[in-house]
Amino acid sequence: MVDPTRFFLPLKLTAAGGTDIGKVRRHNEDAILLRPDLALFILADGAGGHNAGNVASALATTAIANFFESTGHGAEEPDLDAFGLSIAARRLAASLQKANDDILEIAKTSNKLRGMGTTAVALSLFPKTGQVHVAHVGDSRCYRWREGMLEQLTHDHSLINDALEMRPDIDDKALAKLPQNVVTRALGMEPNVRVSVRTYRILAGDKYLMCSDGLSDTLDEDTLSDVLAVDRSSDEIVRTLIVKSLEQGARDNIAAVVISCALDAGAVAVPRVPVLVRRPSSAPPPGGAVDGDPEIVILSEDDVDGQIHVVPSDTADDGVIEALEDFSKNR
């Protein structure tokens, strides 16, 4: 028996993806990009119709991959930065930020492209270290199927979810009056976009499903789980999901990407390499707050004056306030 704390077995990834225009749409604004050479997989759902949502989604997938490729670090580079954050996860989130910048820039060049936007979800998998980073903006989703259980790894950036977070006691009638299927974050909408990113451990047998709302709106989680549970190739799973979605009358574009993780037939247990951490001389000490730091900082986006709330208040010295104001202005 291999001790998982000291050794790992490299995994083999197989991926496939597909899109369909759906039953009603005149244009397919969904886009996917599979880069197994980078262990990077991207799905985007364009918005805007005549405002070139298809251009936005295609541009997003390309920009993410280009950034990811051009900023790749070598094997000797550290895994974590000086703050204990994953460099690869930050890189993935930054790639979506770069895509946002590119879409905004291209939108300025033509009236036809003005106002285009797209949701996006991207996975970066490291089968040799057993980690997967998931980044997303909007309601394009990522699910993980593991040992018969389906789990949604992303949290939709939607009007309904935002309303529930801000007012969890909101009356159901009031909630029902809000527009459904409306996203509150998308690439190409404003200069600053908040990208959600999480890191998970990969296990042999895992299957990851990325999809647009055209699929998740027509197939419930039981159906998704049943399809993923069958021992089929990633390509067969994708085709089955799209067919089932069309059979349910999918009105929107449909996009799906499936990544299956399995033990490499010729894999040999490899000793785990200690996590490398970048610690420049100016880095703060790891773990916990430094004496004198605030315990709570709230940057109020909705306040007219853009107030900064600091607790305890006596920790809000000039240096802290200046740093927070600079960060707030540039986010």
Image (cartoon, rainbow, N blue to C red):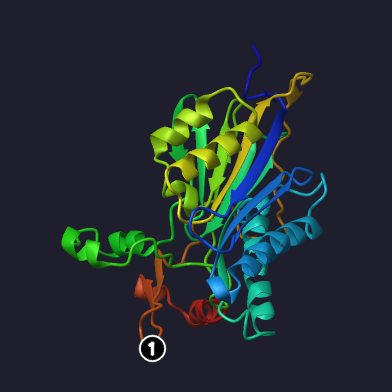
**How would you rate the neighbour count of disc 1 (Cα within 10 Å): few for under 14, some for 14-19, many for 20 or more?**
few
Q: Residue furthest bottom?
A: 305
Residue at 55%, 76% in the rendered image? 327
Dividing the picture into quadrants, the one containing residue 149 is top left
Q: Is residue 157 visible?
A: yes
Viewer-nearest residue: 258 or 124: 258
Q: Position of residue 185 (x, y in %)?
A: 48, 67
Q: Is residue 146 visible?
A: no
Viewer-nearest residue: 210 or 10: 210
Q: Count the marks.
A: 1
Q: Position of residue 26 (x, y in %)?
A: 55, 64
Residue at 54%, 24% in the rendered image? 230
Measured along the vertical axis of the image, is residue 229 above or below residue 274?
above
User: What residue type is disc 1 on?
Assistant: Asp
Viewer-nearest residue: 139 or 201: 139
Q: Which residue is mark 1?
A: 305
Q: Quadrant of the N terminus?
A: top right
Q: Position of residue 201 (x, y in %)?
A: 58, 36
Q: Position of residue 39 (x, y in %)?
A: 72, 43
Dividing the picture into quadrants, the one containing residue 119 is bottom right
Q: Secondary structure at mark 1?
A: loop
Q: Residue furthest top?
A: 1
Residue at 74%, 20% in the rendered image? 269
Q: Quadrant of the C terminus?
A: bottom right
